[in-house]
Image (tube, coloured by chain):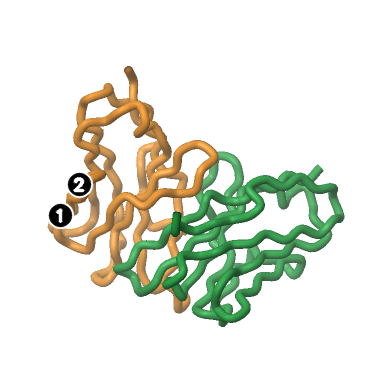
Chain colours: A green, B orange
Amino acid sequence: DTGVSQNPRHKITKRGQNVTFRCDPISEHNRLYWYRQTLGQGPEFLTYFQNEAQLEKSRLLSDRFSAERPKGSFSTLEIQRTEQGDSAMYLCASYSGGADTEAFFGQGTRLTVV
Amino acid sequence: DAKTTQPTSMDCAEGRAANLPCNHSTISGNEYVYWYRQIHSQGPQYIIHGLKNNETNEMASLIITEDRKSSTLILPHATLRDTAVYYCIVRGLTSGTYKYIFGTGTRLKVLA
């Protein structure tokens, strides 16, 4: 399968711990999004990469959150000092072009902070 | 904020066409209408998109009104597996990126 891959699929962590999620986009896609989704809501935009450059960050992305995309391939999203409010599904999507090119989403990483 | 308005929920009988409406009265000339769906606990799945012409693919048809202020997604023969939340999204250049701004979507339930 050459779709978007996210790992882990599920993560349970204690409040205050750091967690890191990984996204492997479709190989020829140079653009990548991270989204967060809480129960009953649509996904909310977090950040956007074009190649290795992080070009936009939502104000939802507090200073405890950091995302990287070294060498423009896979991406990681790290949350430091997790809080219960960080419990959500974290989604990654990739695409190759402009407004006329659809993005493909991964299956997400479900984070539960206890 | 999302630029679309959708009904919160709809039911459809299995085997019948499901017609999901979407209003996007503030759409700009270079913005596309995209449809995704999300089955419980999975990532959003791309369905179809269009600019001004009607579009059809193996999953669905997209009908966009001439003034582009509304559209309808048609699933021609709904099955139980089409039960999902359907998102209508207007996508254009926002703060320098072509990101998707999701609303809360329409929860479609296909009934046996």
Q: Residue at x 67, y 65 (%)?
A: A77
Q: Look at the picture and state if B72 lies above or below B18.
A: below
Who comes first in sequence, dot 2 or dot 1? 1
Badge 2 crowding class, 10 Å Cα cut-off, few under 14, some 14 to 19, many 20 or more, is some
Secondary element at tag 1: loop
Q: Residue at x 61, y 49 (%)?
A: A89
Q: Nearer the viewer, residue A108 or A66?
A: A108
Would residue A85 appear left or right of B32 to someone viewing this image?
right
Would residue A104 appear left or right of B25 to someone viewing this image?
right
Q: Chain of mark 2?
A: B
Quadrant location of residue B94? bottom left
For the residue marked with disc 2, what is the amino acid? Ser
Q: Position of residue A63 (x, y in %)?
A: 75, 70
Would residue B4 appear left or right of A111 to someone viewing this image?
left
In 3D space, how far apart are the residues under numbered discs 2 and 1 (Cα atoms)?
7 Å
Q: Position of residue A67 (x, y in %)?
A: 66, 70
For the residue marked with disc 1, what is the amino acid? Asn
Image quarter of the C terminus of chain A: top right
Mark linked to residue B61: 2
Q: Residue at x 39, y 72 (%)?
A: A96
Image quarter of the N terminus of chain A: bottom left
Mark linked to residue B54: 1
Q: Are marks 2 and 1 in contact (CB under 8 Å)?
A: yes
Q: Position of residue A69 (x, y in %)?
A: 61, 75
Would residue B29 appear left or right of B108 to someone viewing this image?
left
Please tell me how many numbered marks the rendered image carries.
Answer: 2
